[in-house]
Amino acid sequence: MRFKQFQQVAPARDLPEKKLRRGDLATVVDVHPKNGGEIGYSIEVFNAVGDTIAVTVVSESLLEDLTANEILHVRSLAG
C-alpha cells in the first residue's frame, strides 16, 4: 500500500468523467485491497472553499505523491 488514509495526493492523469485534471489536490479517504489487480483508493476532491466536488475510486497507478517542489494553485471548474 503506497498511500495512506487521509494523505493528500494528485491524479497522475486527467479524469474527464469526474472533471478532474492531473495535479488536482485530492485526499485518500479509503483504501481497497487488491481484487485480482491493483490496490484501489477512494479519493475526495474539494473546491477552494472546502465543498466536496468529487468522490471516486481509482487504482494506485492513477495517483501520485505531492512533492516539495510543487506549488498549489486554483483553477475554475467551468470550461
Image (cartoon, grey):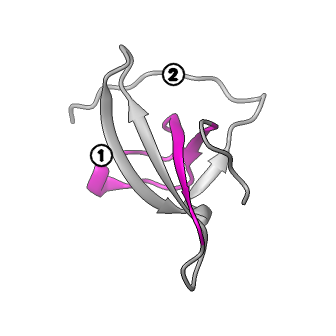
User: For the residue labelled by badge 2, is the local secondary structure a helix, a strand or a loop?
Assistant: loop
Compared with 60, 3 (above or below) is above
Residue tagged by mark 1? 19
Quadrant of image for the C terminus: top left
Instruction: Classify residue 30 as left or right of residue 48.
Output: right
Instruction: Classify residue 42 as left or right of residue 76.
Output: right
Residue drawn at x 42%, y 40% is 44
- The amino acid at mark 2 is His
User: For the residue labelled by badge 1, is the local secondary structure a helix, a strand or a loop?
Assistant: loop
Distance CA(mark 1)–CA(mark 2)? 16 Å
Compared with 26, 14 (above or below) is below
Residue drawn at x 47%, y 46% is 43
Residue tagged by mark 2? 73
Instruction: Classify residue 59 as left or right of residue 70.
Output: left
Question: Label 2 crowding class (10 Å Cα cut-off): few <14, some 14-19, many 20+?
Answer: few
Residue 60, visible in the rendered structure:
yes
Q: How far across and down, in percent of the image, does residue 11 sit?
A: 52, 49
Residue 4's tag is none
Instruction: Tell me which segment is drawn in magenta.
Output: 7-33
